[in-house]
Image: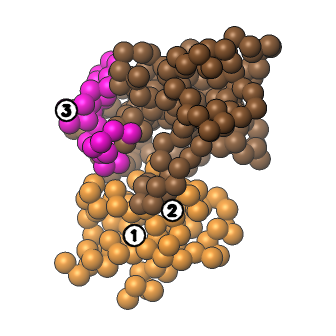
Chain colours: A brown, B orange
Amino acid sequence: MSLVGNDVVDLGDSEISTSHLRERFVARVLSLRERESFERAPDAKACLWAHFAAKEAAYKVLVKGPDAPLLAHRQFEVAEDLSSVRHREATLCLEVECGGAFVHAMAWAGPERPRWGVATVAAGDDSSLAVRGLLLTELGGGAGLAVVLTPIPGSWDGFGPPRVMDGNVPLEVDVSLSHDGRFVAWAVVGCTSQRCDRRSAERSAPTERDDTVGR
Amino acid sequence: MEQEVMGKVVEILRPFVKNADALTAVSMETSILRDLKINSARLVDIVLEIEDAFSIEVSDEAADQVKTVGDAVKLIVENKAA
């Protein structure tokens, strides 16, 4: 089964409005080769955050494997055409969407291309809860289906990667969740189990939000 | 020395924390991501601010180890002692 990681960046966040102008920030995030591309980019801000999101997405894939990398952005190398991202010997497929107000990156390892979606959340809404709800809707929803985070002491956020459980049974999918500012994003790959296929088929009405984009 | 460094670290973190209440009970065990809700993009900024404030250089390896306020304090104290 493929493994997936994703990351969304809200380009309207005032806190990142000048990051692309700050040389030390750029040097901390981009490799030397990427900095050459960055210098030529027509939209430096979008370029920086597309690379940042790609590296975060790749980190989320690789941290699921046996050799978890450092979360050191400049040690990841994004291809100039944004089609792949490399970390040491590992090369992952990459898809980057620059939606104007946001950047979304999805990296994956394996033969199957994951599905993804980005949506907006209202101010005051719990982004974490919202993105879990959207993912479960994509998976067909229903009682017993839940996103589970396993506490892992010493990990970056204190938890392992999210998993989807159907009651006590892990669903045969790999998922990734991200939220930043006004945006939430999910990515999923797999869903090959009979139960999961049935859930998708049983979906009675479109439940995706009108402002959801994805593929 | 740790208390003094911790005070400065909290002041560095303050502008990046959206919920100021989260800093009222800050301790060495406070998780920067989970408890203070600071994301990894802001952590890059924080590492740069720490470098400036304490005149140190933080390697990628050292930055990766910073998960809690205490981790940041330890990194600074060890770097200053080296």
Q: Which residue is mark 2?
A: B32
Q: Residue at x 77, y 47 (%)?
A: A124
Judge depth for marks 3 and 1 and give the one in front: 3
- In the image as oriented, which residue stretches furthest toward the right? A205
Q: Residue at x 61, y 20 (%)?
A: A196
Give the residue at mark 3: A89
Residue A79 visible in rendering: yes
**Res. A8 in view:** no
Instruction: Give how far across and how far down residue A190 sits, in percent.
Output: 50, 20
User: Dot 2, how many residues are within 10 Å of its Cα: few (below 14), some (14-19), or many (20+)?
Assistant: many
Q: State which quadrant residue A75 falls in.
A: top left
**Relative image position of residue A55 (x, y in whole percent):** 37, 36
Disc 3 packing (10 Å; few <14; some 14–19; many ≥20): few
How many marks are shown on the rendered structure? 3
Magenta stretch: residue A130 in it? Answer: no
- Name the element at disc 3: loop
The quadrant of the picture occupied by the N terminus of chain A is top left
Q: Which residue is mark 1?
A: B72
Q: Write down the chain letter for disc 2.
A: B
- Distance from the alpha carbon under mark 3 to that under mark 1: 30 Å
